[in-house]
């Protein structure tokens, strides 16, 4: 048995390497983006800026700016593209999170109740977790391709062309709904593996005696699930829900993975499925755009996630047991 | 007691009369991953009388819990049959048997209040909510937790949780109540209290109750009858005192009694017991001469100047009312315990002589008792 004394310096020493990396790659950037968001027309490394050089102002972050203010937030909040991105993100969140939690739970319960081939199915369901996101996206893009995708072919065979829509001008193009369906299926499926593993380990940690007690008391199956399994699994469900929400709000690579070179949408409509993170990235990327705008947008995203997480924790106090 | 019958609950005899439980040639084997077979319950035959409190007693791993789970229906036997009264329930699923089961760690649903826990079995069979509330309250009153109905299990002490578990098991008015090690999770003082409580509840309801325990004192103190088990086999069934005073074999004799029985090697010679140190005691046993084990209960040994069993005092323990002597038999490397009245003040090293009012003689190889 190891004696744990109150030697804080030992703990500090053990944590030091990680803390150093966190400081440089996590905390410092976070502090910087907080500051940048409130610097009007901030430019990094003295690059020329639109409102003229006010010269010499060196902030701790380096770079130049005009004044401290909230102009960046104004820019973001009046940008229709931001609202489009936010709407897309919100839809992805609202559609994919409940689906992924419910399907993940369902598969975990099913896996937990079989004895034969459980290991086999566990492996199958876990495969997406160890597979490259971009590779998966390419598979999906191919499966759902509007001209030669397998899924579309199947739908076309029964005379249903839902992936393709027709615009007013008569050109066949990808509709928002069809793009959303593909993105949702991809998001749900991609995130499923981890959720199944968490739920499965949660299920296996539930004392079997609860189920025996339920059996002796003639509890119908559905009641066993809703009255025993779900409440006893509620800490896991909360954890998965919160992390799924956060993950979905940060959706980015999935969009890129599916639309590939088209960036956030099909060719010709490259911002169709843009997300908030995509918006932030673009604001940083485009030459001449003040970095502060991207910083402001990321702060807005941060607060949205923060508020929703706090709300969930608040609700869960009543719903999550022990 | 509320006697409204509800859908899916088996017809049962009156709560107050209970039902006899008969186990016939009951066998349960477990096969592990390597294919090794363990016989947990071996050709078990016993009839548990209706309306009695019966303790199923044995060392850990003797198959007593398995027997309980077989009666509950959670385990299926490999062979044999189980009867509740005249009804063969061998192939009846647990939920149709009309049993109440209290688990060793109670298995109370942690997210439900006491009331919800007790009402749960009733809601399963769609007892109307109002009636379920009334019955739950009544049952809670019976086990004296009527004022804790809105608490969660983790706000209760071990003893209170135990009562909730019993109330939950009883609320469906089962034919048989099964308790798995009901006292093992309680501290010593609570254990004493709770076992009296179990006794009282059983007497008030009159339900046939079977409980499993490895603690002989616990089983002897409250049971109408005890069943002693070892290695999957029934050893003996009977009134606790009868089993104690008239054990069928050395295992039962050793398992019951605290301080434990003294086992001394010796010989049977013309109906008398000859200890290895030359002491000769009357036994009244009519068996051919042979090597045997002699069982002497500590309280059967009496100090007497004419005593034939000579010993040297090794240690003296004062246990209040009585004194326990730990002695070495002279000429033998065998330690024995004797309980003597506390007025004797002996010191280690002193020579003592014992007379033996009663003794058991066991076959040396089988452990079977000669009578």
Image (tube, coloured by chain):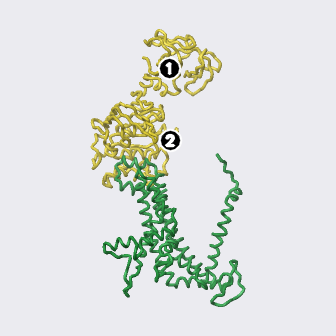
Chain colours: A green, B yellow
Who is closer to the viewer here, A130 or A227? A130
Q: Residues within 10 Å of mark 1 (few under 14, many from 20)?
A: many
Q: Could you say which disc has been placed on residue B186 in the image?
A: 2
Who is closer to the viewer here, B2 or A147? A147
Who is closer to the viewer here, B42 or B323? B42
Q: Residues within 10 Å of mark 2 (few under 14, many from 20)?
A: some
Residue B251 vertical placement versus A24 (above, below): above
Q: Mark 1 belongs to which subunit?
A: B
Q: Could you say which disc has been placed on residue B31 in the image?
A: none
User: From the viewer's perspective, is B35 left or right of B138?
Assistant: right
User: From the viewer's perspective, is B210 left or right of A193?
Assistant: left
Which of label 1 and label 2 is nearer to you? Answer: 1
Q: Quadrant of residue B320?
A: top right
Helix, strand or loop for disc 1: strand
User: From the viewer's perspective, is A56 left or right of B324?
Assistant: right
Q: Position of residue A312 (x, y in %)?
A: 49, 66
Spatial separation of the CA atoms under disc 1 and disc 2:
33 Å
Q: Position of residue B293 (x, y in %)?
A: 50, 18
Q: Position of residue A94 (x, y in %)?
A: 44, 71
Q: Position of residue B76 (x, y in %)?
A: 36, 40
Helix, strand or loop for disc 2: loop
Residue B245 vertical placement versus A316 (above, below): above
Q: Quadrant of the N terminus of chain A?
A: top right
Residue A40 vertical placement versus A33 (above, below): below
Q: Which residue is mark 1?
A: B295
* Mark earlier in primary sequence (1, 2): 2
């Amino acid at each position: 048995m190891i004696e744990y004394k109150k030697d804080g310096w030992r703990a500090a020493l053990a944590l030091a390497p990680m803390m150093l990396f966190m400081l440089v790659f996590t905390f410092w950037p976070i502090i910087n983006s907080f500051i940048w968001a409130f610097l009007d027309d901030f430019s990094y490394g003295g690059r020329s800026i639109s409102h003229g050089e006010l010269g010499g102002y060196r902030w701790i972050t380096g770079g130049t700016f005009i004044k401290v203010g909230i102009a960046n937030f104004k820019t973001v909040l009046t940008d229709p593209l931001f609202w489009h991105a936010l709407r897309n993100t919100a839809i992805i969140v609202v559609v994919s999170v409940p689906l992924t939690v419910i399907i993940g739970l369902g598969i975990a319960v099913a896996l937990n109740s079989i004895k034969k081939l459980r290991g086999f199915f566990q492996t199958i369901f876990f495969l997406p977790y160890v597979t490259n996101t971009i590779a998966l996206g390419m598979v999906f893009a191919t499966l759902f391709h509007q001209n030669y995708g397998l899924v579309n072919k199947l739908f076309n065979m029964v005379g249903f062309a839902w992936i393709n829509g027709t615009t007013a001008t008569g050109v066949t193009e990808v509709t928002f709904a069809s793009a959303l369906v593909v993105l949702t299926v991809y998001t749900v499926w991609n995130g499923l593996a981890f959720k199944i593993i968490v739920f499965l380990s949660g299920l296996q940690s539930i004392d079997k005696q609860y189920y025996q007690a339920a059996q002796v008391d003639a509890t119908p199956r559905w009641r066993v699930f809703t009255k025993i399994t779900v409440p006893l699994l509620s800490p896991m469900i909360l954890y998965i829900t919160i992390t799924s929400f956060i993950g979905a709000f940060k959706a980015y690579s999935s969009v890129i993975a599916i639309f590939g070179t088209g960036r956030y949408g099909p060719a010709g409509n490259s911002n169709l499925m843009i997300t908030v993170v995509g918006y932030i990235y673009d604001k940083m990327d485009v030459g001449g755009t003040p970095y502060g705008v991207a910083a402001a947008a990321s702060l807005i995203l941060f607060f949205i996630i923060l508020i929703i997480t706090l709300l969930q924790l608040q609700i869960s106090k009543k719903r999550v047991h022990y | 007691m509320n006697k409204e019958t509800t859908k899916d609950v088996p017809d049962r005899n009156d709560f107050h009369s209970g039902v006899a439980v008969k186990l016939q040639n009951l066998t349960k084997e477990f096969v592990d991953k390597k294919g090794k077979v363990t016989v947990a319950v071996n050709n078990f035959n016993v009839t548990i009388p209706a309306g009695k409190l019966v303790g199923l007693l044995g060392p850990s791993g003797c198959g007593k819990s398995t027997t309980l789970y077989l009666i509950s229906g959670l385990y299926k036997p490999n062979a044999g049959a189980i009867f509740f009264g005249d009804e063969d329930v061998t192939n009846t699923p647990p939920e149709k048997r009309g049993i109440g089961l209290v688990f060793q760690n109670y298995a109370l649903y942690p997210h439900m209040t006491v009331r919800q826990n007790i009402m749960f079995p009733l809601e399963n069979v769609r007892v109307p909510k109002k009636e379920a509330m009334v019955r739950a309250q009544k049952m809670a009153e019976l086990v004296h937790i009527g004022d804790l109905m809105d608490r969660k299990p983790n706000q209760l002490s071990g003893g209170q949780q135990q009562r909730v578990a019993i109330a939950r098991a009883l609320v469906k008015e089962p034919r048989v109540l099964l308790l798995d090690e009901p006292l093992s999770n309680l501290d010593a003082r609570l254990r004493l209290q709770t076992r009296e409580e179990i006794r009282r509840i059983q007497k008030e309801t009159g339900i046939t109750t079977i409980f499993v325990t490895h603690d002989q004192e616990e089983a002897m103190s409250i049971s109408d009858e005890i069943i002693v088990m070892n290695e999957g086999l029934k050893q003996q069934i009977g009134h606790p005192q009868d089993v104690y005073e008239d054990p069928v074999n050395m295992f039962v004799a050793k398992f019951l009694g605290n301080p434990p029985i003294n086992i001394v090697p010796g010989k049977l010679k013309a109906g008398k017991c000859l200890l290895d140190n030359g002491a000769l005691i009357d036994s009244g046993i009519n068996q051919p001469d042979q090597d045997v084990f002699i069982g002497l209960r500590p309280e059967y040994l009496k100090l007497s100047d004419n005593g034939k069993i000579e010993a040297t005092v090794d240690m003296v323990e004062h246990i209040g009312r009585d004194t326990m002597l730990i002695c070495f038999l002279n000429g033998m490397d065998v330690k024995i315990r004797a309980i003597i009245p506390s007025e004797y003040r002996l010191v280690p090293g002193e020579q003592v002589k014992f007379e033996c009012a009663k003794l058991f003689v066991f076959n040396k190889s089988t452990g079977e008792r000669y009578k």
